[in-house]
Amino acid sequence: MDLQTLHSYGSSYAAFININLTWIKNKELTRILIDAWCGMYGTFMGMFALHYIYRYFVIMSNTKMLKTFKSYKIIYWMLLPLIYGTVWGTICYYFCASNPEFTDYLSKSFHDTYNLEMTPIVYIGVHFFPTNENGEKYINWNGVIGVGIIWTMIMSSFFIIIYFGVSCYLQIRKNFETSSRQNNNLQMQVFISLVVQTLVPITLMHLPVSMVFLFTFLEISIGKFTGLVVISIAVFPAIDPLPTMLIISDYRETILKTLQSFLNKKQTSKKREVEMEIQNIN
């Protein structure tokens, strides 16, 4: 499943793949895999929410709730991202299915933007305001309801992150009053890391997809630039741990020492090679 991308045109958007560029040639299977791919995005939304709930329990030192993450009860917590992903994928399958009218609507845009015909294209998407036989626009309520549910899931994840993120901040500030100077310094680093790590998923995951829905609903075409959403999703796992690694001094120093040790070994190895070459020449 490579070259998966998104496309926006008029009052529509589509997640699509060109099966000529993949080893999977079955269109129905490919379509199900696209639904599953979108479902995994929904799973991420649930995982973000769960992550901040867990952080809140850690900062509050709520040992009773933390124990639930170390026993079989963690299964109940994992239901949150599982429900998000299942609902998201199901919505995509039933509410965002392709149809001949939608395909005709997208054909010119795909030809102009990618120089592609629709025959090898497998896609799912929504056309908010299609036209009838008389050329009159009408509301595609099936798509509006589907996107409405997805939007609600995005917003619920967003508000959980904000609520528990702010709660963590308030608790960290309260800890300043009773902690030592050294511990306060660590607490401040944790707070800064928390703020940055809150902005990362919002910037790379929540905001891009929300903007695609908004532009589409307003009938603002952004064409192939919608594909930047796929890039932001792809780079998120690599960027997400960086704030903690670079802001928390203990982690940062350990990383720098490891890099320094690696560079020193490399320089030593290179120096030995040069000395051996000199000896061979002599």
Image (tube, rainbow, N blue to C red):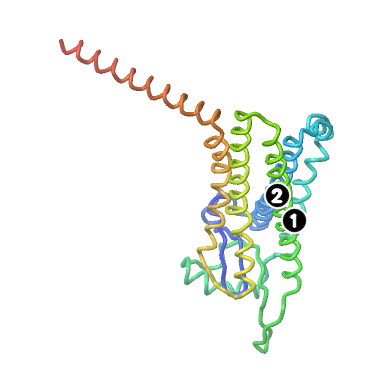
Residue at far front of view:
177
Residue at far left of view:
282
* Residue 26 placement: quadrant: bottom right
* Residue 142 placement: quadrant: bottom right
**Label 1: few (<14), some (14–19) or many (≥20) C-alpha neighbours in 10 Å:** some
> Which residue lies at the image location 60% right of the left edge and 65% below the top edge?
212
Q: Secondary structure at mark 1?
A: helix
Q: Is residue 157 left or right of residue 71?
A: left
Which residue, given by chain and number where applicable, does mark 2 sit on? 161
Tag of residue 251: none
User: Image height check: is 223 above or below 235?
Assistant: below
Q: Position of residue 228 (x, y in %)?
A: 52, 58
**Which amino acid type corresponds to the residue marked 2 in the rendered image?**
Ile
- The number of numbered discs placed on residues in the rendered structure image is 2
Q: Position of residue 70 (x, y in %)?
A: 79, 29
Residue at far bottom of view:
134
Q: Nearer the viewer, mark 1 or mark 2?
A: 2
Q: Secondary structure at mark 2?
A: helix
Q: Position of residue 135 (x, y in %)?
A: 64, 87
Which quadrant does the C terminus fall into? Answer: top left
User: Image height check: is 151 above or below 141?
Assistant: above
Q: Nearer the viewer, residue 119 or 166?
A: 166
**Which amino acid type corresponds to the residue marked 1 in the rendered image?**
Ser
> Which residue lies at the image location 63% right of the left edge and 48% below the top edge?
198
Q: Position of residue 103 (x, y in %)?
A: 61, 71
Q: Nearer the viewer, residue 118 or 124?
A: 124
The earlier-in-sequence mark between 1 and 2 is 1
Which residue, given by chain and number where applicable, does mark 1 sit on? 156
Q: Nearer the viewer, residue 192 or 120?
A: 192
